[in-house]
Image (cartoon, coloured by chain):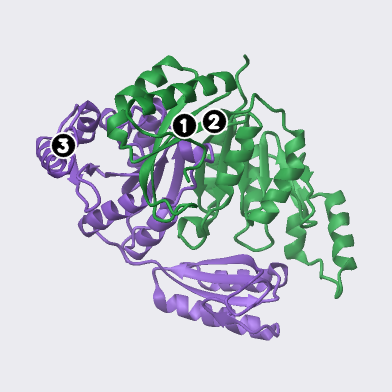
Chain colours: A green, B purple
Amino acid sequence: MTENPTACLLIIGNEVLSGRTRDANLQFLATRLGEMGIPLREARVIPDIETTIIATLNEVRARYTHVFTTGGIGPTHDDITSECVAKAFGVPWVVHEETRRIMAADYARRDPPVEFNAARLRMATLPLGATPIRCEMTSAPGFTMGNVHVMAGVPRIMQSMFDALAPSLARGTPVVSRTVHALGIYEGNIAAALEAIQARFPALDVGSYPFYRSHGPQGFTGGGVALVAKGTDAAACDEAAAAITEMLRGLGAEPVQGEPG
Amino acid sequence: MTENPTACLLIIGNEVLSGRTRDANLQFLATRLGEMGIPLREARVIPDIETTIIATLNEVRARYTHVFTTGGIGPTHDDITSECVAKAFGVPWVVHEETRRIMAADYARRDPPVEFNAARLRMATLPLGATPIRCEMTSAPGFTMGNVHVMAGVPRIMQSMFDALAPSLARGTPVVSRTVHALGIYEGNIAAALEAIQARFPALDVGSYPFYRSHGPQGFTGGGVALVAKGTDAAACDEAAAAITEMLRGLGAEPVQGEPG
């Protein structure tokens, strides 16, 4: 089995670091990339500061197969991601003629027409050599430069851009998971048995996540643990989930596959 | 004015990188730390891998005034944060006697009593020299080691630990913000004027955030921009917000302080 490609996400924006905006892109991308066999290995939230963006880009693009960025590609002065990508790659930041034509046609078609001013022209300006990521939500594109994929921060636009980008990415072996929930079980009671199961399945990632529900879907109130076996070997995940279920039954618990009722 | 202290957050956990769990701690800590004048400058989500945790801890604790971590301090085999902090600081990881006594008394008091087994004893094991962070939700503590503050990943426990820790942190000048919303305004129409306002207030962070509401609190549907002036100088924030309001009125928009209706 060949090694899966790896991904890093850079969330670029002061508004996330100040608490003003709650990021919604990490979970979407983590899930989609895992399904594609390009597991997310790291995510960073960094501010709109040129030196920070450039240094971080150069660090992570050397380390991971793919780098995805969200945020900072709009028309305002605090949108500096695109220019920083150009500087990180050491290439000029220039108007992309095809993109300019597409945006001009889009703006002219609007009623009333939208002025294609200097601020909007920044959104047609890309690092030299970048490939635009065109989506259905806007004529202002994201882009791919080398192994860096630059997307909008607004979730519905980011998702549209990712949908457009995804078919071009080489897939790895999908990461799958099996989850067994047990109600009324404490982590401290199963830790040793769970560690033994992890040792039996070294290629998998066996995790334990306590939860508490005050109003579950069927009126359930109380705590428990979600035990997860995750990896690229689906058959091994099934075996590990069976071992977890057996272990829980030995403790007198009633394990539930999937979400607890 | 002295420089504010700075903060970095490490979110430690495979479950966030796989998309299984949506982080809820970043926004809470970003908001609270900003109010305390300890602005969050960076956040990283990293996996439960020992070498990664140690290297990241040592990089960021040298760079920021404070490092906060969430996740990985429970009793199961995938909870390795505490041991990694000890290794990052080059100190032994040893049973903290006072904590052991407190946890033993807590477990003995439960009905039925909880077994204080090897897995649970790991939660009483701390880097030598660490100061426990005791909270109301659990007898298993977080801890402070040097400038690193280690907290649980479960949001209600993390928040309780932060409440216990916060009074001991030296505060800086609170970061405040003023937000002006304008409906039906596009970023591309105000970018130049907003950049001029940013130039007038170089000590502030002037940001522009487009939004779209399909069902606002008063039935509002549509898009607009939220324009934010943020910094430690509250009077300058007021002035910048007034300049933003004036700029928007000049465009025929009806700016709204705070949330749009």
Kindly identify which residue carries mark 3.
B129
Q: Amino acid at mark 1?
A: Val
Q: Residue B113: x, y in percent?
A: 16, 38
| Disc 1 crowd, CA 10 A, few/some/many (<14, 14-19, 20+) | many
- Of helix, strand and loop, which one carries label 2? strand
Quadrant containing the N terminus of chain A is top right
- Of helix, strand and loop, which one carries label 1? strand
Asked if labels 2 and 3 touch by Cβ distance under 8 angstroms, the answer is: no
Read off the chain for label 3: B
| Disc 3 crowd, CA 10 A, few/some/many (<14, 14-19, 20+) | some
Asked if labels 1 and 3 touch by Cβ distance under 8 angstroms, the answer is: no
Q: Nearer the viewer, mark 3 or mark 2?
A: 2
Task: Evaluate whether residue A104 shows in this view.
Answer: yes
Q: What distance separates the C-alpha of mark 3 from that of mark 1?
A: 34 Å
Kindly identify which residue carries mark 1.
A228
- Of helix, strand and loop, which one carries label 3? loop
Asked if labels 2 and 1 touch by Cβ distance under 8 angstroms, the answer is: yes
Q: Amino acid at mark 3?
A: Gly
Closer to the camera, A128 or A3?
A: A3
Q: Are marks 1 and 2 on the same chain?
A: yes
Closer to the camera, B246 or B76?
A: B76
- Residue at horizontal 12%, vertical 38%? B104
Q: Amino acid at mark 2?
A: Ser
